[in-house]
Image (cartoon, rainbow, N blue to C red):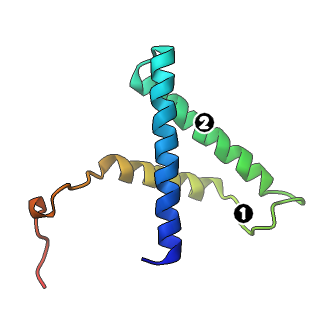
């Protein structure tokens, strides 16, 4: 595994654990149903995107060279969300259906 892939997996695991912990805490404390809390989480991600995009725009933009493109960025975020919703990890490789042949 390449270093960048390892770092991405570690970051994803950390973000997921943090969000799951907060999701459960908010549900328990607020009594709100899961989809209400999911909607609030999605709104939080949107507001974080807006804040980060603003710091990467204009004459005093962050020097990292990322330039926000709202349409493209929203497409990337939607694709990631849909992929995560549809992905079901297989616990046992023997249960996987073979695709193609070698």
**SS of the residue at dot 1?**
loop
Which quadrant is home to the N terminus? bottom left
Residue on which the image places disc 2:
44
The residues tagged by marks 1 and 2 sit, at their Cα atoms, a distance apart of 21 Å
Q: Quadrant of residue 98?
A: bottom left
Which quadrant is home to the C terminus? bottom left
Q: Nearer the viewer, residue 74 or 48?
A: 48
How far across and how far down the image is residue 26, in percent?
A: 51, 24
**Where is 67 relative to 100, above or below?**
above
Residue 67 shows which numbered tag? 1
Label 1 neighbour load within 10 Å: few <14, some 14-19, many 20+: some
**Where is 5 relative to 31, above or below?**
below
Q: Earlier in the sequence, mark 1 or mark 2?
A: 2
Please give left or right for residue 84 compared with residue 26 in the image.
left
Q: Nearer the viewer, residue 98 or 17?
A: 17
Label 2 neighbour load within 10 Å: few <14, some 14-19, many 20+: few
**SS of the residue at dot 2?**
helix
How far across and how far down the image is residue 93, in percent?
A: 15, 63
Query: Residue at left 13%, top 62%?
Result: 96
How far across and how far down the image is residue 41, in percent?
A: 53, 34
**Where is 5 relative to 76, above or below?**
below
């Amino acid at each position: 595994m390449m270093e960048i892939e390892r770092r991405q997996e570690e970051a994803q695991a950390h973000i997921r654990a943090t969000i799951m912990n907060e999701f459960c805490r908010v549900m328990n404390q607020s009594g709100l149903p899961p989809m209400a809390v999911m909607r609030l989480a999605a709104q939080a991600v949107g507001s974080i995107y807006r804040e980060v995009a603003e710091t990467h725009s204009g004459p005093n933009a962050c020097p990292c060279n990322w330039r926000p493109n709202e349409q493209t960025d929203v497409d990337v975020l939607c694709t990631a969300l849909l992929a995560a919703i549809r992905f079901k990890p297989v616990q046992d490789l023997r249960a996987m259906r073979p695709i193609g042949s070698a």
